Image (cartoon, grey):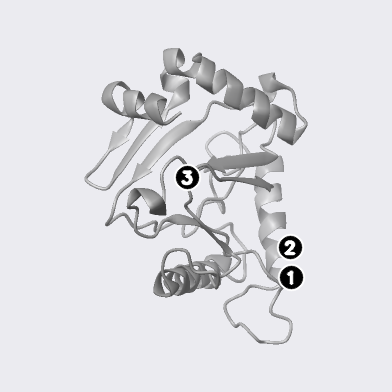
Amino acid sequence: LLTLGQQGMKTHQEKKSDVQAVVSLDKAPALNASAAISKVNARLAALAGLPEENLEEGYFGVYHAGHEMKALHLDNHHALASPPRVVSFVLYLLGEPDGLVGGGTVFPLAGAPDAAGSEPDIIGEAALAAWEAAVSEATMNFRLGDVPQLGRICPGARPAGEAIDPCIATMARASRLCQAATSRGPGSDTTPPEVVRALPGDAIMFHH
């Protein structure tokens, strides 16, 4: 996979900057039809318990020192996605042993709701339920001309009538978790559980 990704970076880059590059396999059919990707797809389908034909084409992402993620990725982030996405995987091909400083995946909505006030930037169950309801309503009532990602990009435009913007607390917690992971250093066994460090060969599976 690493060799395939390196090949794609030479021939099929979709987006490139000094600190980021992307190869989308839906725009690189020859790479997507490779034996390596076929084996990965078979394993992911088996793990998810879904037929292979339900898999979306994946992508390779490269992030260098200096890249800063300024938005929260919300799956099913497009109201027109059909059928809706139900599970995703992140596979790390490079990581800290390869010289990557930091890196990883943070889940700022993970953890117990802040019922006792112990962590003020965890949004509670009521706010999460309201957020989900607003997104679901935007999907069910979508009309041509509507913004398909309304309420699904954080930070971004919010649905009308949404009393509280959950992005404020969510992005604040994401920043705090990343800072905590960075301050504890590579390989630390005290990394916050909401942060999954980038270790080559590791994979994350999460449901929506």
Q: Which residue extends farthest bottom?
A: 117
Judged by depth in the image, the label closer to the viewer, 2 or 3, is 3
**Label pair 3/1, CB-CB below 8 angstroms:** no
Residue 22 in view in this figure: yes
* Alpha-carbon span between mark 3 and mark 1: 37 Å
Mark 2 and mark 3: span between their CA atoms?
A: 35 Å
At 52% from the left and 42% from the top, the residue drawn is 201
Q: Are marks 1 and 2 in contact (CB under 8 Å)?
A: yes
Q: Which residue is drawn at 57% across and 33% down?
A: 144
Q: In terms of sequence position, does the residue under pointer 2 or pointer 3 come before the other?
A: 2
Instruction: Note whether 6 is above or below 90 in the view shown.
Output: above
| Helix, strand or loop at mark 2 | helix
Quarter of the image for residue 131 reads bottom right
Where residue 55 appears, x then y in whole percent?
64, 26
Q: Where residue 101 sits in the image (x, y, percent)?
A: 34, 58
Amino acid carrying mark 2 in the image: Ala
Looking at this view, is 30 or 171 the one in front? 30
How dense is the environment of label 2, judged by Cα within 10 Å: few (below 14), some, or many (20 and up)? few
How many other residues sit within 10 Å of disc 3, few (<14), some (14-19) or many (≥20)? some
Read off the residue under disc 2. Answer: 129
Q: Name the residue under label 1.
A: 126
Residue underneath mark 3: 200
Q: Where is residue 52 in the image (x, y as percent from the top left)?
A: 68, 21
Q: Which of marks 3 and 1 is nearer the N terminus?
A: 1
Q: Which amino acid type is shown beneath numbered disc 3?
A: Pro
Badge 1 density bin: few <14, some 14–19, many ≥20, Cα 10 Å: few
Which residue is at 31% across, 29% downward? 9
